[in-house]
Amino acid sequence: MTLPLLAQPVFTDVFPPDEYASRRARVMARIGDAVAIIQGTTERPGEQPLRQANQFFYLSGVVEPRAILLIDGRTQRSRLFLNPRNERRETMMFGPGLYPGEEAAKATGIEGVVARGEFQAELDGVREAGRTIYTPFRPEVLGCASASDPAALARATRTDPWDGRISREEAFLQHLKFASPRSKIEDLDPFLDEMRGAKSPREIAILREATRITGLGIIEAMRDTRPGMKEYELQADAEYVFKKYGAYGPAYFALIATGENTWYSHYHKNTRTLDAGDLVQFDYAPDFRYYSSDVTRVFPANGKFTPWQREFYTIYLRLYQALMTSIQVHLRPSDVIKNAVLNMDAVMKGYKFTDDRIKQAATQFVERYRNSRSNSLGHNVGMEVHDVPSPTVTLEPGQVFTIEPAMQIAGEHVGIRLEDMILITNTGYENLSAFVPIEIADIEKMMTRHGLSDAQVKLK
């Protein structure tokens, strides 16, 4: 599915209004007679584009600063509170915005869109009735982050003796408690997380496109790679592709590790010069329409695997594939792991090792799974690259996650880690990133083709 490109307007039609309305209806069904109140993000400091917080965007699609959304379980209606029109902001910075009135109500599908100044009167009614209020407790998640990241920052800031600030969400909770002291305040995040755990067909279409863009970025870097380049030059290749296809920005910092830097799972300095004998581990993806992807590939800096690299990479790839092909719908991840170990044992038995270091690393890799007590294969992906948890203990249709096990050789200070986007379907799973070269022959063939640097040379 090819999705039309959009700018970043104040209300994006990433999904039609009925998708957001369906989500709000599910919230209403869960909260009963209560109300849910969600605040949008603030303006950005300086010359930065506005990106809405994920939980707010999930329920509204609205990208306006300081918006407030109230979902009423009793009346089965929602109200959106927006700032009045700011002509200077519109003229100087952003162009047409979304403002209180019927036009905004029609565009968003929200029953009432009124001035933000009316929120106090709405809250007065909640206070007088002593109604329960649901609101997100954890810090907002914007681009280039997952829920654990701003939460950790908020904890560190609150406990810092030279800082001590509370998060914006904690301040909002305090205001709600003061404004409506008879109301019970409940956490809305668990409800929204449960909803976000299984993706709708429209969300899957966005994730599919995000993964296509990711793969094209990796392929462009693969084609362009050569000894003497800097790691950040490969990052530039991917970012060209991301922006070409309409990405807002990166989903996370570029993890482009070469040579001994492949030992580090999240190395991101990206300043090393590629040597001819290096392997490149490339892990980078865009933030596309408020959804992320996450794919990793490994390839040789000079376009050809050495015999040692071929042995190391091949055994890892076969063990990785043994894990992937063990995935089945309705199974617990722990059961997938048990089945995968049986397949890995068969791979190990038939593999011809010439280097004991590689054999030891592969053996440790298998044993780590054999002794695992985890009920996780990797991490979920969605609006965040490390997305909210799955709502079920088994793998069910609509869940999207990655697998990314690492195999390392301490003596060489090198590692290998591949990663693919897995969508659970009614009959099994689909590898959304399967088109990105992963077999040695396909990688080496791709690396014979011209890259962006070749085009630049021709222009000189």
Image (cartoon, grey):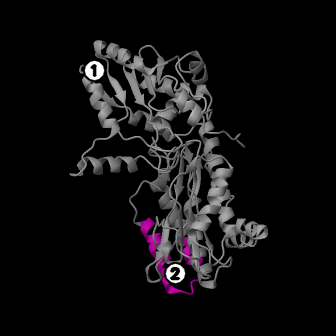
Residue closest to the eye, 307 or 349 = 307
| Label at residue 358 | 2
Residue 169: quarter of image: top left
Locate residue 453, reporting x and y percent: 71, 68
Locate residue 34, reporting x and y percent: 36, 20
* Crowding near the residue tagged with mark 2, few <14, some 14–19, many ≥20 C-alpha atoms within 10 Å: many
Magenta stretch in the rendered image: 346-370
Q: Comparing marks 1 and 2, which lies closer to the viewer?
A: 1
Residue closest to the eye, 269 or 85 = 85
- N-terminal of the two: label 1 or label 2? 1
Residue 95: quarter of image: top right
Is residue 53 visible in the rendered structure shown here?
yes
Amino acid marked by disc 1: Ser
Locate residue 225, reporting x and y percent: 66, 71
Q: Main secondary structure of the magenta part?
A: helix
**Residue under circle 1?**
180
The residue lying at 39 percent from left, 36 percent from top is 190
The residue lying at 39 percent from left, 19 percent from top is 119
**Helix, strand, or loop for circle 2?**
helix
The stretch drawn in magenta includes residue 366: yes
367 lies left or right of 182? right
259 lies left or right of 334? right
The stretch drawn in magenta includes residue 249: no
The residue lying at 56 percent from left, 26 percent from top is 98
Locate residue 397, reporting x and y percent: 57, 42
394 lies left or right of 152? right
Residue closest to the eye, 227 or 446 = 227
Amino acid marked by disc 2: Ile
Distance from disc 1 to disc 2, alpha carbons, whole Å, reads 64 Å
The quarter of the image holding the N terminus is: top right
